[in-house]
Image (cartoon, helix red, strand yellow):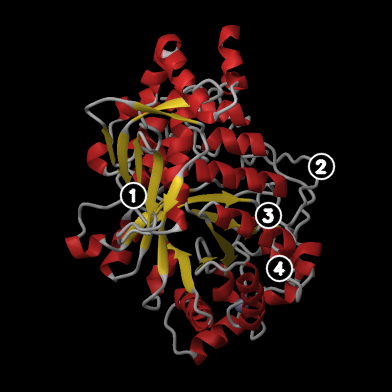
Amino acid sequence: MSKWFLPIFNLKTDSMKRVLTAFVLLFAGMSSFAEVDYRVIPLPQKIEISPKGGSYVWNRSDVREILDLKTDNPEAYVITVNKKGVTVHAATKSGLFYARQTLFKSVANEPEGDVLLPYATITDEPRFPYRGVHLDVARHFMPIDFIYKYIDILALHGVNQFHWHLTDDQGWRFEVKKHPALTEKGSVRQRTVIGKNLGIYDDTPETGYYTQEEMRSVVAYAAERNINVIPEIDLPGHMLAALCAYPELGCTGGPYTIWSDWGVSPDVLCAGNDKVIPFLKDVLAEVCEVFPSEIIHIGGDESPRDRWKACPKCQAKKAELGLSRESELQTYINKELDKFLSERGRVLMGWDETLEGGLSENAMVMSWRGVDGGIAAARQRHRAVMTPGGWCYFDHYQLKNTNPQDHNLQPLAIGGYTPLSKVYSYEPVPEQLSEEERKYIVGAQCNLWSEYILSPEHVMFMLLPRLAALCEVQWTQPEQKDFEDFKKRLPAMQNIYKQRGYTYCRRSE
Ligand SMILES: [Zn+2]
């Protein structure tokens, strides 16, 4: 901005300032005028620029907000820009929040100071009610400060569910007051395998957990940004960190060590031990105290049956319940916890394996082993969230070149190849479903498993800009989606990443 422009900010009245700013912007900053077109990421459903032209000089903050919108969608909003100013109509505070986000993103790349907003009406609402992003903090712990930053990133992309994967074989990160050894012992991993399970280990302990107070603060911070926090306690497999703290809960009794490798451990909770269900209820009771989320995730994935087959207690329980297969022992555990959560007004969510033994009417399913779990869930009238590995696993590589010599392009990853274009192409509602069944697909989510993701910067690199692509899958109607158009709008979003100091992958395929 040139110096002769500055004195107008010393003018005494706002109206004089606005008239002059409009005059100056029109002659000196036509490019600035042309750039505000409200075509942000995620793309709003309907943008109608006034055919008569005209624009309003906006100070980037004054918005008349009115809660009078008649709509079934609590996140819908309408922005009107005319000579009277900027008015937002919404049905709830969530709608107001998204209207402000669209306005903020529309002008984020404009030079500082007042901006010219073309007269327009923007009518918008998200396509799906569930728009999730996951983070695994068990394999590599992420400091609490970064969790706040993560929530900011999610909010910028219109995400409304943060799925927090808090426990696993490699670390327990959720404070449980009744069972303090879970974090005292379960949050300390002595060493970690280097590279791709090469059998070589570092000697650096990986430690850390969140106090209940810290997690409550995160929940409140997220709620201000229209984000619900869904905690996950993964069970009955992925439990080595808990077994390390309480070996009597396992089939063999241990001793156990917190796993320094990646993969699926054969050691799981003993389904025949009468202490196990009360233990899990203790944990979930504290989970429910900390997290007001209606949805509580109990994992349920990758739980091998080897120990149960060889364990006298598990075999006795199987006989007592008249079960024919070991897998039904997991169903038995799920049903106990499903009932416990339902009584507290909560809804159980599990990975798609949990569907195999049948779930209560309300329970939700997260489809990760492809899309079949989501299809089966919808056909059984369970709400399903689509997170198929091929499109939604952001721990995969995002660039084709995975040559270790070129690891300055992208660091070592777990595998796969899920570039930006593939994420953008994803359609969460499977064609096989009938009109009625489609209603049960409530949204999509990306997952960030942290075996190979070592730091907050690394998390952001894997997430961005792929989340920009996913958020149009989650928010925008399929007929509006156009990858070439998206790529034209992406640099404006990347400028916001730069302004905020977010790390992101600068190449995209
Ligand atoms: Zn057992």
Q: Looking at the rendered structure, which numbered label has been put on residue 125?
A: 1
Spatial CA span between label 3 and label 1: 40 Å
Q: Looking at the rendered structure, which numbered label has been put on residue 203?
A: 2
Q: Element type at marker 2? A: loop
Count neighbours of disc 3 (C-alpha within 10 A) and say few if under 14, some if 14 to 19, many if 20 or more.
Answer: many
Q: Amino acid at mark 4?
A: Leu
Quadrant containing ligand 1 reads bottom right
Q: Earlier in the sequence, mark 3 or mark 1?
A: 1
Establish if 80 lies above or below 136: above
Q: Spot the residue most to the bottom.
A: 320
Q: Looking at the rendered structure, which numbered label has been put on residue 243?
A: 4
For marks 4 and 1, give the one nearer the viewer. 1
Q: Amino acid at mark 2?
A: Asp
Q: Residue at x 80, y 47 (%)?
A: 205
Q: Are marks 3 and 1 in contact (CB under 8 Å)?
A: no
Q: Are marks 2 and 4 in contact (CB under 8 Å)?
A: no
Q: Which residue is mark 3?
A: 170
Establish if 285 lies above or below 473: below
Spatial CA span between label 1 and label 2: 50 Å
Q: Looking at the rendered structure, which numbered label has been put on residue 40?
A: none
Q: Amino acid at mark 1?
A: Glu
Which quarter of the rendered picture does the C terminus lie within? top left
Spatial CA span between label 4 and label 1: 45 Å
